[in-house]
């Protein structure tokens, strides 16, 4: 069997397994939409109106950082795209049929996202220089977002600690109730959760960028990736700082 025939057979097998699932997913989404209808306007969550400007800013910045630059809507879609991209990458490197299937089996969620990310760049840009510049711009954006978020995180942590210290002193003097103290503890826990989730999602994106860099180097030996290396290193250092802030807000006395 020729390589072309093997590749087309691989594509048909993959499509045969994916398309029925796509149809089922679309049917499920349609049924859900018809049952749920248009969402009714909702009021802000309880306690939202009590947030400080720094807390509101941190929430917005955390959401921006947590939103990946790639356009994949769901992890399920990323897995499909990653599998296809793995096959395409192997094929362009002139591997045999076994290599194509191995390439399509890139492991885990990160592997799938790396495949989807690389595939999107290959579709959008014609030259390897444009692809590299685009990846550098993506990581640079996340560096700007993470730097801004770190500033807000530090401010929110300082506010939380100061507020809790005041309330604990008032509680010991019986000026406030346990319920009032618990309310502030709950706010601190929400802040800690937001910071932790944003840090985790930033790390996931850093892993994808690092994986995409590896794929790019393999496909373009000899091309310098210094700019991309520097941006990824800076992003990872900022994530380390964010992890330290999470721990700072997780000391026992803060609940």
Image (spheres, helix red, strand yellow):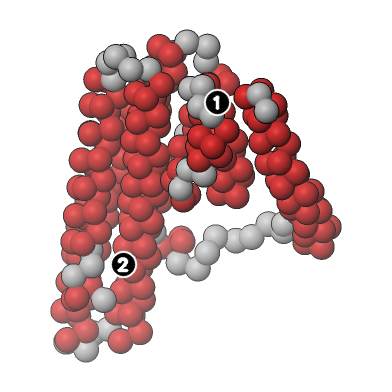
List x then y, in percent, for residue 46: 50, 68
Residue 173 vs residue 29, the one in the foreground: 29
Residue at 27% over, 83% down: 176
- Report, in whole angstroms, how far the alpha carbon at label 2 lies from the one at label 1: 51 Å
Residue at 75% over, 44% down: 16
Residue at 20% over, 47% down: 241
Instruction: Describe the element under mark 2 as helix, strand or loop.
Output: helix
Residue at 72% over, 58% down: 40
Question: In this orientation, does residue 231 appear?
Answer: yes
Q: Which residue is mark 1?
A: 91
Instruction: Describe the element under mark 1 as helix, strand or loop.
Output: helix
List x then y, in percent, for residue 202: 36, 45
Q: Contact (CB < 8 A) between labels 2 and 1?
A: no
Q: Which mark is residue 8?
A: none
List x then y, in percent, for residue 4: 66, 23
| Residue 209 vertical position relative to residue 26 in the rendered view, above or below | above
Image quarter of residue 158: bottom left
Question: In this orientation, does residue 142 appear?
Answer: no
Q: Which mark is residue 188?
A: 2
Horizontally, residue 81 falls left or right of residue 145, namely right
| Residue 127 vertical position relative to residue 2 in the rendered view, above or below | above
């Amino acid at each position: 069997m020729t390589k072309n025939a093997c590749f087309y057979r691989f594509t048909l097998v993959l499509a045969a397994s994916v398309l029925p699932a796509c149809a089922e997913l679309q049917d499920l989404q349609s049924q859900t939409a018809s049952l749920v209808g248009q969402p009714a306007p909702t009021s802000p969550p309880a306690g939202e109106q009590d947030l400080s400007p720094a807390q509101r800013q941190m929430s917005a910045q955390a959401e921006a950082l947590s939103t990946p630059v790639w356009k994949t809507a769901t992890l399920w879609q990323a897995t499909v795209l990653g599998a296809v991209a793995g096959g395409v990458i192997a094929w362009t490197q002139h591997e045999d049929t076994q290599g194509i299937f191995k390439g399509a089996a890139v492991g885990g969620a990160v592997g799938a996202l790396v495949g989807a990310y690389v595939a999107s760049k290959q579709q959008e840009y014609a030259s390897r220089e444009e692809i590299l510049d685009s990846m550098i711009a993506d990581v640079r954006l996340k560096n700007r977002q993470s730097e801004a978020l770190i500033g807000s995180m530090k401010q929110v942590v300082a506010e939380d600690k100061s507020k809790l210290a005041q309330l604990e002193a008032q509680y010991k003097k019986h000026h406030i109730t346990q319920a009032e103290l618990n309310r502030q503890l709950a706010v601190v826990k929400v802040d800690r959760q937001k910071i932790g989730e944003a840090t985790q999602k930033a790390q996931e994106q850093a892993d994808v960028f690092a994986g995409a860099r590896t794929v790019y180097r393999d496909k373009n030996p000899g091309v310098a990736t210094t700019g991309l290396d520097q941006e990824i290193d800076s992003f990872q250092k900022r994530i380390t700082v964010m992890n330290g802030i999470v721990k700072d807000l997780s000391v026992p006395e803060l609940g």
